[in-house]
Amino acid sequence: MSKMNLTRRGVLKTGAIAGAGVAAPTIFTAQSAAAFTNEPTGSSVTLGFNVPQSGPYADEGADELRAYELAVEHLNGGGDGGLMNTFSSKALQGNGILGKKVEYVTGDTQTKSDAARASARSMIEKDGAVMITGGSSSGVAVAVQALCQEAGVIFMAGLTHSNDTTGKDKKANGFRHFFNSYMSGAALAPILANNYGTDRRAYHLTADYNWGYTTEEAVRTSTEAMGWETVAAVKTPLTQTDFSSYIAPVLQSGADVLVLNHYGGNMVNSLTNAVQFGLRDKLVNDKNFEIVVPLYSRLMAKGAGANVKGIFGSTNWHWSLQDEGSKQFVQSFGTKYGFPPSQAAHTCYVQALLYADAVERAGSFNPCAVGEALSDFEFDGMGNGPTLYRGEDHQCFKDVLVVKGKENPTSEFDLLEIVEVTPTSQVTYDASIFGGELGACNPGA
Amino acid sequence: MLGLDKKHTNLLLLVFVLTLLAPFILNPFPEGSGMAQFNAGYPDLMQRFVIFGIFAIGFNILFGLTGYLSFGHAAFLGVGSYAAMWMMKLLTMNIIPAIAVSVIVAGLFALLVGWISLRRSGIYFSILTLAFAQMSYALAYSVLTPITGGETGLQPKLQDPRILDGALEAGASPKANLFGLEMGSSFEWSVGSWLFTFNVGYYVAAIAMLASFYLAIRIFNSPFGMMLRAIKSNQQRLNYTGLNARPYTLAAFVVSGMYAGLAGGLMVAMDTQVGAERMFWTASGEVVLMTILGGAGTLIGPVLGAGMIKYMENIMSKINSTILHEWFAFLPDGLEDFVVTLIYPFIGKGWHLTLGLIFMLVVIFLPGGLVEGGQRIAKLFKRKNPSSDTPDGKTTPAE
Amino acid sequence: MDAIILQILNGLDKGSAYALIALGLTLIFGTLGVVNFAHGALFMIGAFCAVTLSRLLQISHTVIDETQKDFLGNPLQVEVPYIYDIFGQATGDVIIDWAVPISILFAIPVMVLIGVAMERGLIKHFYSRPHADQILVTFGLAIVLQEIIKYYYGANPIPTPAPDAFKGSFDFGAALGFDPNTIIYPYWRLVYFAFAAIIIGGVFAFLQFTTFGMVVRAGMADRETVQLLGINIDKRFTLMFGLAAAVAGLAGVMYTPINSPNYHMGMDFLVLSFVVVVVGGMGSLPGAVLAGFLLGILESFASMREVLEFLPGINQIIIYLVAIIILLTRPRGLMGRKGVMED
């Protein structure tokens, strides 16, 4: 009994039974039909795009969805082929995946773990999706990753920055292209030391949940290694909208740098408030007061408007990069939608292509085969330079961008400028430092 | 039968048949057809229907009978979920201890919250319960991270102790089960181009729902239930007769908290994951909406309301513009685009808008909720026999 | 000492936003007896009045600039606001810069109209219905309003800065004899506080010193008797709804430079404002204002580093904890009347 696991409707949609009409009731179980969950047997394969469509990250989710639609178009041979032209692996032919036309279903994560899992389960159980991807927060990524591990499908994480996703909560069926808190800290610290000196006193405001903790920890350790002193670290509630009472005491503490370990709406508000208080016009300890935002997102930076000018942060990718892959992607995306893609769009597009490529190279949709093809896979031409999908924790290692809010933006998209591309070697860490257990891959049935 | 009168026996039988046949009823459209989008007969959603049904039935015991509007019921659901998850991590993946403990822990927490909050009534009571729930949420998300997992929540891990379970086979992951019968396992039956899924987890949850429903009928018809109604209609008069209403309301509060705990435990059993959002005020608000939408104070109403909201959330949100274009592909191009543009704001990412509109329409035109709608339709067909045959003959909207 | 003064200042500023929203909520509740879950949405719509006006002022035509390139390498299309063509660039910039204060004039009629339309079109039919129905219908309305805004403006926050004249902050420390930079406070937040004080004072004066206000107060106390005296109290209550909507809307307009508005900002404030109203005591206007400031100040103190080291996580729960304590010690909140919303 326990062998009859999750359903696979893809079989049925196109299987022989469908043609048989109202035949005598046919009973079959998963076991007899397929080797792994939702094995596509017809002429098409279904992918599940699970992105936030309501709630504060809805715009980010919309951009992710655009990227996925573009990726599907390219995989099926439409458009200009996008990053398939520059991708170092040439396994993809533009004829779908393994010759099967790519179809997709969409769902709304609402940026809530429960809703995201419900949506992902419906894709797996009802629509027969063989891979789930997307999302805009680490809570959702970890929750959906665990679900995919149980169900026996591949999870290609979208935007998730917490160390936990490929750290203590890593799973054999889950893969992350996006960078993480540790890398942000490691990439930022040298740039901060170069620009602001090594005898700075930092004041941290940290979002009071897992991602905030790991980000604070990362920035703190790496800046302290450069000689900075951490004056204080104050935790702020996720639901906070007005940060004035946290920002007002900063100057009294004698700190001369404020680090805002916030993301999304929290980041927009805390940064706006900090600039409002005129912190950046002040001289403390004979130094200009500075603000740092460890994780930048262009979409969110837009919400903070002119307040981002001159403020350092890190990002996974930015459309102004001049390598072939980035130029190609901006070209394809911009031509289709009329504006440049966000980093969320980029990481999602790349994840979709990497999955398809791995399937082609493995010659099977079996999650275990795909996982093997992705593990320790080295590639280039996807916009981040040479990249490694490390086998031990399924984390991508690539260059990290340190960016700064642009002083004189020429358009509403031109908000960040790249200050430095921190090379991979500087942000690589040992896979064991965050604990967790990858486990074995689970093909489902 | 079972100590119920004929009307309620019929109602229970009806619910029994509906839950038993849900895999057929919820999957009316053949696979692969355009309408298959509206099929809800897959395990996850069926489980959610009955689990939120339990949650709403329990809420209705408090709100529908006593009129006390709790705005913090999600806290009991969340606490129950955490308790169940810890049982699974520490003891065994068997769902029995997990669910038992979730009910007990939620009951104890409800006892504490109820004991304090029931000192006040009306909106003051609502705000007290809301305050407790919001505190639970905020703490679970932040400072209690070591216990609750915070943002990323809790899932069973390979290295959990599970002292009652044997060691896992190599490569296997811990799965919730009932004495070896896995919650995720399903039996599929395809008839022609229809596919029906019979999921173990769903039937386990459905049995729990039927038991809860039966208990709710008994409570509604018991002297205790009568006392609760008396509290709702005039607490002052009750006090003047020398009765202290507090123990009764507290009992109702605890019972309804235990229902929430049961729902929480079942959620973990069906889908081994728990996160703090489950306790956010919007989750508490959702069960209030489910109950009012279905018909507060009626037996079947809350279940209908729960089904309606969960259906909207899971089915409407998945319709995207590509699917719309497929549906209307038979129209001429210009007209097709026009129709799609017209409908698009209401589906997919716009599902909240449709939900809001439905709330408004229901409450404006059907003050008794969906149950009243059902009654009106029933009346149309049975004009000769107007007053009978309503689910429980009662439509008083609750206050 | 300076840290305490700073947090009191902060609390007053936070409290003024809470008090303004709670005031409007109580006005509606006190006059019409309706629990308005759409009040947060009115606050949000007010904020989007400011967004809309600043967008209107910046309606542009495009000029192609061959010397610059856009991200795809095509010639850059430069947007030139029409307002430049009308007033010249310098005056145009000043007008765009002052968009938020100008929005006040724009928001008042819009909000009153929305309020009156809401009351006449929807709320009116719910006076005799149970509070649970009122909650459901206004909550539904709040979702609908919010989704409409999301449809047109997206989900991301939209930066709506204050005029340049109000950028930066005032140094109280220097003025009061402390070290410079110890007590600084942004000009715009001070403006917000003053603005809130004026609005609150204005509403109280209106109710206290005008005939109209007197009739409304009489109606709040005993609606039937006032009607028996031949006064059309309904019409006045409708106007009060409009007034309450305008108060919420103005609170929203002025709030935009403090935090960039987004479509769910109303929901963020909704729960909080209900807690404020209930702590103040249902139906009491002074109670609502008092509770707003009280909770604002306590919230500010709870966020101090020194307090958090001692009680980690207190900033997460302070408002709710205080609400519980107050409601247990004072059964009807700070200044509530007996018998209002107690059943």
Image (spheres, rainbow, N blue to C red):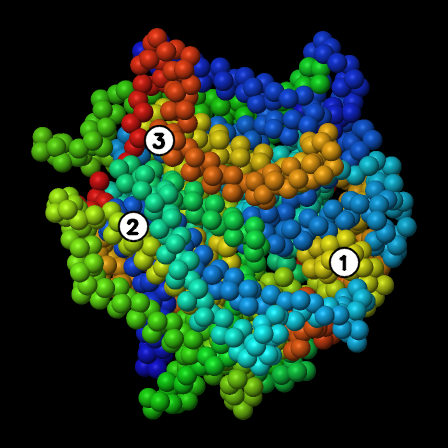
Q: Do the residues under discs 2 and 1 have CB atoms within 8 angstroms?
A: no
Q: Residues within 10 Å of mark 2 (few under 14, many from 20)?
A: many
- According to the picture, the residue beneath numbered tag 2 turns out to be C238
- Residue type, numbered disc 1: Gly
Are discs 2 and 3 located on one and the same chain?
A: no
In the image, taking residue C31 as reference, residue B267 lies left or right, namely right
Res B267 visible:
yes
Res B172 visible:
no
On residue B367, the disc is 3
- Residue type, numbered disc 3: Pro
Secondary structure beneath label 1: helix
Is residue B296 shown above or below A408? above
Q: CA distance from mark 3 to mark 1?
A: 50 Å
In the image, taking residue C278 as reference, residue A107 lies left or right, namely right
Q: Do the residues under discs 3 and 1 have CB atoms within 8 angstroms?
A: no
Residue C222, percent from left and from top: 14, 48
Q: C125 or C196: nearer the eye?
A: C125
- According to the picture, the residue beneath numbered tag 1 turns out to be A334
On the rendered image, what quadrant is the N terminus of chain C found in?
bottom left
Q: Residue at x 62, y 74 (%)?
A: C85
- Residue type, numbered disc 2: Thr
Q: Residues within 10 Å of mark 3 (few under 14, many from 20)?
A: many
Between tags 2 and 3, which lies in front? 2
What is the chain identity of the residue bearing mark 2?
A: C
